[in-house]
């Protein structure tokens, strides 16, 4: 079966701009979680969506937002980009029962 | 959510068995223990999950003592390609809010 697809793979943005990242989960998976990974902070949980509802949220500012569509595809948006937002953004899909999560390859965002 | 503590790094040689222990003293009754593997610039990959005693699959074993305050991931006969970061996670069986710790960086030498 097809894996988790994240687009785009690479992105360069300027400070102050906004960005939207996309994640297509594995067919049948209703949960999509987003993570930010940086060398200094490791993997940090952003939020989780399950059946179009945000079910869990990490400790990130309101500039980070997301949504999930009826087909389970999810997007995350970062507004007013800062240099510190440069990171690998990963999404993971699962059935939403705490079992195995499947991660995408990530989107590497560089803010200049 | 239970906090986890793992060694920051470990070295091993090809063909050896590697055991990585994770401490999770405040694990809750309905928490599961899950391990992931991550290679550079890739997303983490599920290795194994367990609740108690021992779980084994084709790539690893997971040992969980009766008090469940720690767990040990066992990788039999590691190869160079097992060089990666290994994360121990503890969380609810339902409701997915997975918190990754710093992980253990395993370096396998020839």
Image (cartoon, rainbow, N blue to C red):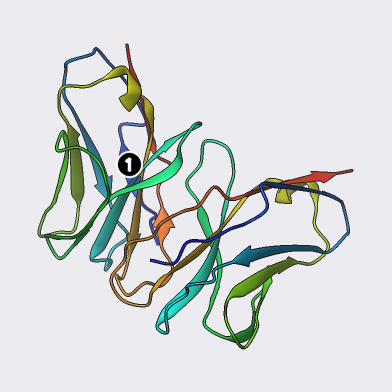
Above or below: residue A83 compared with residue A77: above
**Picture coordinates of residue A111 (x, y %)?**
31, 17
Above or below: residue B5 compared with residue B41: below
Side of B58 where A19 appears, left or right: left
Side of B84 where A68 appears, left or right: left
Side of A73 where B22 appears, left or right: right
Image-quadrant location for residue A33:
bottom left
Frontmost residue, B20 versus B81: B20
> Chain letter of disc 1?
A
Task: Give the residue drawn at x 14%, y 38%.
Answer: A62
Above or below: residue B53 compared with residue B12: below
**Picture coordinates of residue B17 (x, y %)?**
83, 64
Tell me how many marks there are.
1
Task: Give the residue drawn at x 16%, y 17%.
Answer: A17
Side of B6 where B42 appears, left or right: left
Where is the C terminus of chain A found, in terms of image quarters?
Answer: top left
Image-quadrant location for residue B98:
bottom left
**Picture coordinates of residue B19 (x, y %)?**
76, 64
Task: Give the residue drawn at x 38%, y 66%.
Answer: B1
Frontmost residue, B69 versus B38: B69
Q: Residue furthest front?
A: B26
Write down the residue under mark 1: A6
Where is the N terminus of chain A found, in terms of image quarters?
Answer: bottom left
What element does badge 1 sit on? strand
Above or below: residue A77 compared with residue A103: above
Image-quadrant location for residue B67:
bottom right
């Amino acid at each position: 079966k097809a894996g988790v697809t994240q687009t785009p793979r690479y992105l360069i943005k300027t400070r102050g701009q906004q960005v939207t990242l996309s994640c297509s989960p594995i067919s049948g998976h209703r949960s999509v979680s987003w993570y930010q990974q940086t060398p200094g902070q490791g993997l940090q949980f952003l939020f989780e969506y399950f059946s179009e509802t945000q079910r869990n949220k990490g400790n990130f500012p309101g500039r980070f937002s997301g949504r999930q569509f009826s087909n389970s595809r999810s997007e995350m948006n970062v507004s007013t980009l800062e240099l510190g937002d440069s990171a690998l953004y990963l999404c993971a899909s699962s059935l939403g029962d705490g079992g195995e999560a499947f991660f995408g390859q990530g989107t590497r965002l560089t803010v200049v | 959510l239970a906090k986890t503590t793992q060694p920051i790094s470990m070295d091993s040689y090809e063909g050896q068995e590697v055991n990585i222990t994770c401490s999770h003293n405040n694990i809750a009754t309905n928490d599961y223990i899950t391990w992931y593997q991550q290679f550079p610039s890739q997303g983490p990959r599920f290795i194994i999950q367990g609740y108690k005693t021992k779980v084994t699959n084709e790539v690893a074993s997971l040992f969980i003592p009766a008090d469940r305050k720690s767990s040990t991931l066992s990788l039999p006969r590691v190869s160079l390609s097992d060089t990666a970061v290994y994360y121990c996670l503890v969380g609810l069986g339902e409701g997915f809010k997975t918190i990754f710790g710093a992980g253990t960086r395993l370096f396998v030498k020839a």
